Amino acid sequence: MSVDPMTYEAQFFGFTPQTCMLRIYIAFQDYLFEVMQAVEQVILKKLDGIPDCDISPVQIRKCTEKFLCFMKGHFDNLFSKMEQLFLQLILRIPSNILLPEDKCKETPYSEEDFQHLQKEIEQLQEKYKTELCTKQALLAELEEQKIVQAKLKQTLTFFDELQNNVGRDHGTSDLGRKLRTLETVVEKESKRLKIILIAQ
């Protein structure tokens, strides 16, 4: 059997060519053994039909084994030649052929191209880190805005209650309108901040 690993062929076929040849060899050998057993059985049946035959089944077995060794020796010689032809001409990918997944290796890249790609990767990594930091800062600011908005709502509720009490006592309503305008402005700013964050 060949000792060349033929890894490129294995990548293409999904099996090593040597494994394929080994299976063919084993299949031929099994078939040869089965044929020799069948031949032996036929000879034994023929001898049973001959009266006063001096040939015993043991002698038949010895002759069958000798013939099997002779056939196996010839078969091994023929198979080694067949294996060489298969591995060189049929199951080998020529050195000038590239598999589809290796087409990217067709275009050689220089050291300068490699350095350029390395710089581009580093720049993209820096941009990503910057974008990530910006996003985290905006998220933190959004959380702060939510806290401020909650406090502002509490304050507005307090002023609404205060205005209702004062309005009832003194008839004043301008304070409530001003506070509602302030609440609208805060909500608009909060929405604008959310849109900026989503865009990031």
Image (cartoon, rainbow, N blue to C red):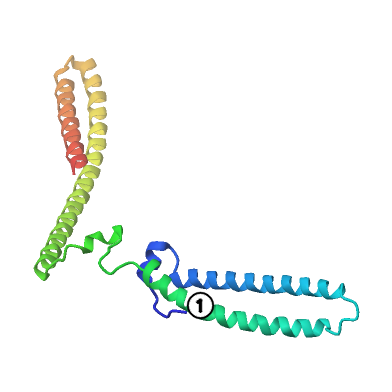
Query: Quadrant location of residue 42?
Result: bottom right
Instruction: Count all numbered tags in the image, as a single digit.
Output: 1
Q: Is residue 116 left or right of residue 66?
A: left
Q: Secondary structure at mark 1?
A: helix
Nearer the observer, 37 or 149 = 37
Location of residue 120 with respect to 170 vertically, above or below = below
- How far from the left and from the top, in percent, is residue 82? 46, 74
Q: Is residue 67 left or right of residue 58?
A: left
Q: Residue 32 at what x, y percent from top left?
A: 63, 73
- Which quadrant would residue 133 be assigned to in this image? bottom left
- x, y (%) of residue 194? 21, 38
Identify which residue, 120 or 43, lies in the foreground: 43
- Residue identified by numbered label 1: 78
**Position of the C terminus by quadrant:** top left
- Residue sitting nearer the eye, 118 or 62: 62
Crowd tier of the residue under label 1, counting other residues whose Cα lies within 10 Å: few below 14, some 14–19, many 20 or above = few
Name which residue lies at 11% across and 70% down: 111
Question: Viewer-proximal residue, 77 or 15?
Answer: 77
Tell me if residue 199 comes above or below residue 47 in the rendering: above
Identify the residue shown where x is 25% and y is 29%.
158
Residue 98 on image: x %, y %: 27, 63
The residue drawn where x is 81% and y is 75% is: 44
Tell me the kind of residue under disc 1.
Answer: Leu
> Where is residue 127, by image quadrant?
bottom left
